[in-house]
Image (cartoon, rainbow, N blue to C red):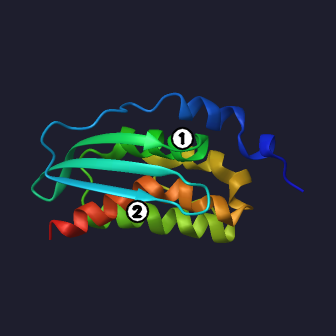
Amino acid sequence: MLRVEDIYTQEILELSSQVPTNSRLDNPDVTITKGTPICGSIMTVDLNLKDGMIDDIGLEIRSCALGKASASIFVKNAKGLNLDDVKKVKKDLVSFFKTGDFKMQSAFDKYKYFEPARLVPYRHDSIMLVIDATIEGLETTK
């Protein structure tokens, strides 16, 4: 049986303390707030877009270390991504959670640290929160 410390590894805790931004954008093109009903995590994602790609991203995070660690990885690599790119990140991460086969792009390779959480499906929503909010935001601009 997994223990809390098995999921909240040193790598996850370090990533969760390194979110590159925890502030909102002044004049975002789009804002999405999403939450997870099981754990109560809430994240607001602000996006500025240029030619359909993420030009800047702002966050307000009220989440556990898993959500913060995921936001840290994602935000560091989000600039220049379009809707299809973000959907691919989601597809690859969902596949990893289901199969254990890690095929993420090198920019997102730190998602491998979520291996222990892979075995706890009710925690996946918190990890996916920043990605899901970004997809929803990009879809509203189409």
Q: Residue lying furthest right in this view?
A: 1
State the count of labels: 2
Q: Amino acid at mark 2?
A: Asp
Residue 20 placement (x, y as % from top left): 39, 30
Q: Earlier in the sequence, mark 2 or mark 1?
A: 1
Horizontally, residue 12 falls left or right of residue 140, namely right
Residue 69, numbered circle:
1
x%, y% of residue 94? 55, 67
Crowding at mark 1 (Cα within 10 Å: few <14, some 14-19, many 20+): many
State which quadrant residue 119 falls in: bottom right
Side of 8 relative to 55 (left or right): right
Q: Is residue 50 visible?
A: yes
Please give the name of the residue rendered at 9% of the width and 56% of the height, measured from the top-left corner. 51
Residue 106 shows up from this direction: no
User: Three-letter amino acid code at disc 1?
Assistant: Ala
Left or right: 99 in relation to 1 = left
Which label sits on residue 49? none
Q: CA distance from mark 2 to mark 1?
A: 15 Å
Taking the spot 27% from the left edge, 53% from the top edge, the residue there is 81
Residue 53 image-quadrant placement: bottom left
Q: 20 or 4, which lies in front? A: 4
- Tell me the quarter of the image containing the C terminus: bottom left
**Quadrant of the frame with the N terminus:** bottom right
Disc 2 packing (10 Å; few <14; some 14–19; many ≥20): many
Q: Are marks 2 and 1 in contact (CB under 8 Å)?
A: no
The residue positioned 35% from the left and 32% from the top of the image is: 21
- In this orientation, which residue lies closer to the viewer: 100 or 119? 119
Q: Which mark is residue 132?
A: 2
User: What secondary structure is marked by label 2?
Assistant: helix
Residue 68 position in % (x across, y down): 51, 41
Element marked by disc 1: helix
Nearest the eye: 92 or 37: 37
